[in-house]
Amino acid sequence: MPNKKHHPSALNEKPGISAPEIISSVAVGHIQKFRKIQPSAKELVEGILDENITALSRAITLVESTNVNHLAKANEVINACLPYANKSVRIGITGVPGVGKSTFIEAFGKYLTGLGKKVAVLAVDPSSTISHGSILGDKTRMEELVKDKNAFIRPSASGETLGGVARKTRETITLCEAAGFDTIIIETVGVGQSETAVHSMVDFFLLLKISGAGDELQGIKRGIMEMADAIVINKADGDNIKRANLAKLEFNRALHLFPAKKSGWTPTTAACSAITHEGISDVWETIQKFLELTKGNNYFFEKRKEQNQYWMLETINEQLKTNFYNNPEIQKSLESTKKAVQNDEISPFAAAQKLLETYFKKD
């Protein structure tokens, strides 16, 4: 029988021509070289004063760094920016998750930039206690404001801070003010009564509420209500307008139960809709009245002096804690002491005392 010719399968793939390299090794080298170049403190300060957003962002990253090697440089940048700071109004905005803080801030921020204001939004996202990560999605939520050339949005993770603000938010305010932002808005985590640190770094404290979320009296918590300079019922639109106005009335009655503020200001209540922008201008008008009153009676300036002192003491506490855990002797004995506490071989209080004695022992 004659041999049949063997024909290759049509499914066989023929060798083709190799694709050219799409990444330029020269370009990669330039990028890697650029990344290794860290601007000096002087260059960062000059960029901030020139209102360069890249320089401002890099400086904030430096300030937020937990690397002890960055501390001296961060302090140099902050100290150089201090003479150009303190020329803004600082507004803290808080409320439970779902109240519409990001939507409100975008509407409010757009209103302010429309008035010619330069607005910096320091948005603090909650960090997971399990993975320690944060979504940091505020720029996505504020899609209109983020495109505004007169606005700057900086999301930060709250980390282990219980006060509802990021660890370095206070220093970030100074940098933003030096960069020419005259209105600083701090959006906090929204964790309820524990959210008090924001009050110690802002001039005006705004509490956002919503109606129809349960018993209104449940929302009248003495701690956070006493700190609020204004309560705004958000989402007052559509079928919710009637409920929002009722909630506004109930909160207004509750405010009269609290003692008078040292500022001489009587807290107000209002309803607004971040969707329709109804009532947004009234919020700014309220803040303007507050500033006029508190600057007139000197409370505004005295409060800022108290805040500076408070944050000095907080920084001391934070630095002592950092130094304690970075101490080589503590790091050497901490794990074994933890295990001893877990096994009930020593009480937590005696263990803590032992570690502190190790830390403070004389050479």
Image (cartoon, rainbow, N blue to C red):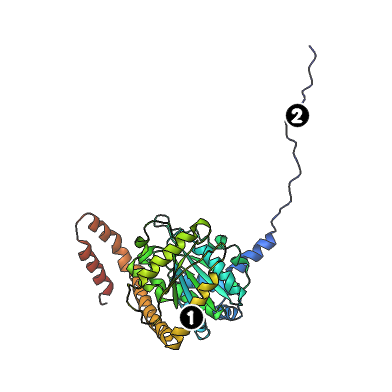
Can residue 35 be seen here? The reply is yes
- Please give the name of the residue rendered at 72% of the width and 30% of the height, measured from the top-left corner: 11
Quadrant of image for the C terminus = bottom left
Quadrant the N terminus occupies: top right
Q: Residue 179's mark?
A: none
Q: State the SS at label 2.
A: loop
Q: Crowding at label 2, few (<14), some or many (≥20) Cα neighbours within 10 Å?
A: few
Q: Residue at x 54, y 69 (%)?
A: 280
Q: Amino acid at mark 1?
A: Lys
Residue 202 in view of the camera: no
x%, y% of residue 308? 40, 81
- Mark in the foreground, 1 or 2: 1
Residue identified by numbered label 1:
289
| Nearest to the observer: residue 225 or residue 13 | 225
Residue 55 horizontal/vertical position (percent)? 58, 74
Q: Residues within 10 Å of mark 1 (few under 14, many from 20)?
A: few
Q: How many marks?
A: 2
Snapshot quadrant of residue 223 = bottom left
Read off the residue under disc 2.
10
Amino acid type of disc 2?
Ala
